[in-house]
Image: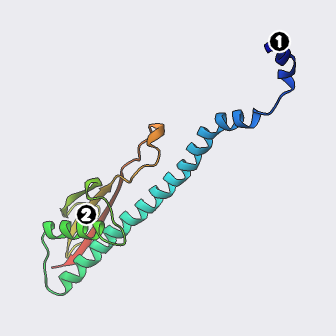
Amino acid sequence: MIRRALPDLPKDSSGAAVLEFAILAPIFFAMLFGVVQVGLQMWSYNSLRSIVADTARYTMVEYQKGNQLTPDQIENKAIAVAVNSPYDFNIDQINISPPTSIAAGDSDYIAGMTGYSLTMSYTPPTVLDFTGITAPTLTVTRPIYVTT
């Protein structure tokens, strides 16, 4: 029985599509998830920039109203903006350095202004765990200037 089937084996292509799919499917899905990961990275980076900008805007408005915020209050506002809608960042993936003062002599220094440098990092979620690829950490730094 086996000897009778062997001569027909080279002509039989009934399982070729399944075999080709089995070979190409992991590559195809890795590329598909790679595109999704790039989209997540871009969304996360733009969101991170918006969070820092929103925090800077809030700080400047509060100073104009006469409320001088401490670096801890600025940091807490950045966290509050990040973990709430529309950003909904995972608080365990956020790292905010306490705002540091920009001193005279720094390249970002503006005379007559009080300046803070706000640095925020975020590690976005990854959809490529099955490939062993992790998402890189994104970092944004922005100066905040307020009148004194």
Q: Which mark is residue 118?
A: 2
Q: Which mark is residue 30?
A: none
Closer to us: 22 or 124: 22
Give coordinates of residue 114: x percent, y percent.
18, 72
Check disc 2 and give the amino acid type: Leu
Residue 49, quarter of picture: bottom left
Residue 140, quarter of picture: bottom left
Residue at horizontal 29%, vertical 77%?
A: 57
Vertical relation: 60 (above or below) 100: below
The image's colouring method is rainbow
Check disc 1 and give the amino acid type: Arg
* Secondary-structure class at tag 1: helix
Residue at horizontal 14%, vertical 75%?
A: 69
Give coordinates of residue 130: x percent, y percent.
46, 39
- First along the sequence among labels 1 and 2: 1
Q: Which mark is residue 3?
A: 1
Residue at horizontal 39%, vertical 66%?
A: 47
